[in-house]
């Protein structure tokens, strides 16, 4: 006898986020047949759809397959009942960011629009406090020089500390996620180290090859690659900027190769994000329901990139509003980097961990 323990609150939340009529799934299996990423053994998403209909939170949160899905939407396109399994998977992922969040309140405030003012207020208060402690909480006089407003030593040490704190909290959440993945695979016997299996999925990560397997919407792969590599390039340039500040070679001239690389990264991000935003606005039939988490991530990343370019122009053109723009840019940085594990950007971590788990469990 199977003992089913539905979680009505979870089911309500899943329906609300996915906008799917869960109970109309007739278990025909078309979605699993058309999904090009589903393994032959125990394919998804049909089995998850019945669990979703029954409100089985423990089966869906911490489920590897939820993260192996790359949201191509093929299953939703072919579902004869219009139940939208792709949106249901996306909603489970969104709920997972809250479920594994450490501390919990950050997961809550970043996944509910009613808490957005608080999410914005937190970086405003903390950055202002750091500026106050540095003795620079005022607009400096003279030509624009951001280090007069936020001294490099304060900027680099505070943001580096906060980034490491985020990494530590993110790892704590991922450890619980890994435990849940194992619970769903009672027969799981790890056959090698995490690093070994991470290396085994390098092609999927570097080339985003799983996107090529989806029959729908080829532009998704191009957009994801542009954003992925644009962001990595931006991190690289930022690391150099920190080094340049330490050795007192900052600010960089507009012709400096690292400055040029930073602008190339910004262009890559803007094109990639532009494709993603356009697809979500103009192709709702194929791209499905766009949730608050989708928009929060896309808009934050877009604002981060645009504000970075504008802040650079403000310095070279000596705009009076430069420091206000710079403060806004720092809030955008906060939303992308410090809030990473709690927003949709967290899929970067959760998906990789799930893919490593799948590789170590031999789930192909
Ligand atoms: S979600 Fe749609 S395609 Fe999949 S089993 Fe249910 S009715 Fe069939
Ligand atoms: S969205 Fe695409 S990858 Fe995800 S379950 Fe549906 S068909 Fe498979």
Image (cartoon, rainbow, N blue to C red):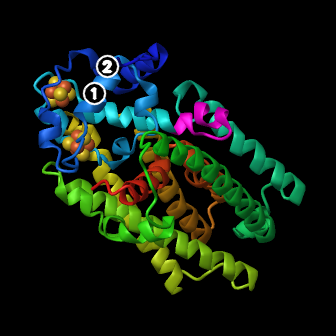
Residue 74 located left or right of residue 272: left
Q: Position of residue 162 (x, y in %)?
A: 72, 56
Q: Is residue 364 visible?
A: yes
> Disc 1 vs disc 2: Cβ atoms closer than 8 Å?
yes
Main SS class of the magenta portion in the image:
helix
Q: 195 or 265, which lies in front?
A: 195
Q: Position of residue 20 (x, y in %)?
A: 29, 22
For mark 2, does the 10 Å Cα neighbourhood hold few (<14), some (14 to 19), or many (20 or more) residues?
Answer: some
Q: Residue under circle 1?
A: 49
Please state the extent of the stretch shown in magenta in the rendering.
97-109
User: Considering only vertical position in the picture, is 240 above or below 275?
Assistant: below
The numbered dot on residue 53 is 2
Residue occupying image coordinates x 38% and y 55%: 361
Residue 261 located left or right of residue 79: right
Q: Position of residue 344 (x, y in %)?
A: 46, 44
Residue occupying image coordinates x 42% and y 55%: 357
Residue 338 located left or right of residue 157: left
Secondary structure type for disc 2: helix
Residue occupying image coordinates x 37% and y 70%: 200
User: Considering only vertical position in the picture, is 183 above or below 29?
Assistant: below
User: Considering only vertical position in the picture, is 357 above or below 157?
Assistant: above
């Amino acid at each position: 006898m199977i003992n089913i323990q539905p979680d009505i609150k979870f089911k309500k939340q899943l329906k609300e986020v996915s906008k799917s009529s869960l109970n109309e799934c007739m278990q025909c299996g078309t979605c699993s047949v058309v999904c090009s990423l589903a393994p032959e053994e125990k394919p998804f998403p049909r089995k998850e759809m019945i669990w979703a209909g029954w409100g089985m939170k423990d089966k869906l949160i911490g489920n590897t397959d939820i993260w192996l899905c790359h949201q191509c939407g093929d299953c939703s396109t072919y579902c004869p009942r219009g139940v939208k399994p792709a949106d249901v998977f996306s909603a489970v992922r969104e709920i997972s960011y809250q479920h594994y969040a450490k501390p919990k309140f950050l997961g809550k405030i970043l996944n509910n629009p009613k808490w957005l003012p608080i999410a914005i207020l937190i970086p405003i208060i903390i950055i202002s406090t750091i500026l106050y402690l540095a003795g620079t909480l005022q607009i400096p006089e003279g030509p624009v020089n951001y280090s007069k407003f936020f001294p490099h030593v304060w900027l680099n040490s505070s943001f580096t500390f906060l980034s490491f704190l985020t990494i530590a909290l993110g790892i704590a959440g991922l450890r619980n996620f890994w435990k849940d993945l194992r619970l769903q695979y009672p027969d799981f016997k790890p056959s090698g180290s995490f690093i070994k299996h991470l290396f085994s999925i390098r092609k999927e990560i570097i080339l985003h090859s799983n996107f090529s397997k989806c029959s729908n919407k080829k532009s998704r792969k191009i957009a994801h690659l542009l954003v992925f590599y644009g962001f990595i390039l931006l991190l690289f340039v930022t690391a150099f900027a920190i080094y340049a500040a330490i050795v007192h070679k900052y600010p960089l001239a507009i012709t400096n190769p690292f400055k040029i690389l930073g602008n190339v990264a910004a262009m890559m991000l803007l094109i990639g994000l532009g494709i993603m935003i356009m697809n979500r606005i103009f192709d709702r039939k194929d791209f499905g329901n766009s949730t608050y988490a989708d928009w929060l991530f896309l808009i934050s990343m877009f604002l981060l990139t645009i504000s970075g370019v504008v802040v650079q122009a403000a310095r070279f053109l000596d705009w009076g509003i430069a420091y206000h723009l710079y403060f806004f840019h720092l809030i955008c940085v906060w939303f992308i980097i410090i809030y990473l594990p709690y927003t949709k950007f967290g899929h970067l971590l959760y998906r990789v961990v799930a893919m490593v788990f799948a590789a170590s469990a031999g789930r192909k």
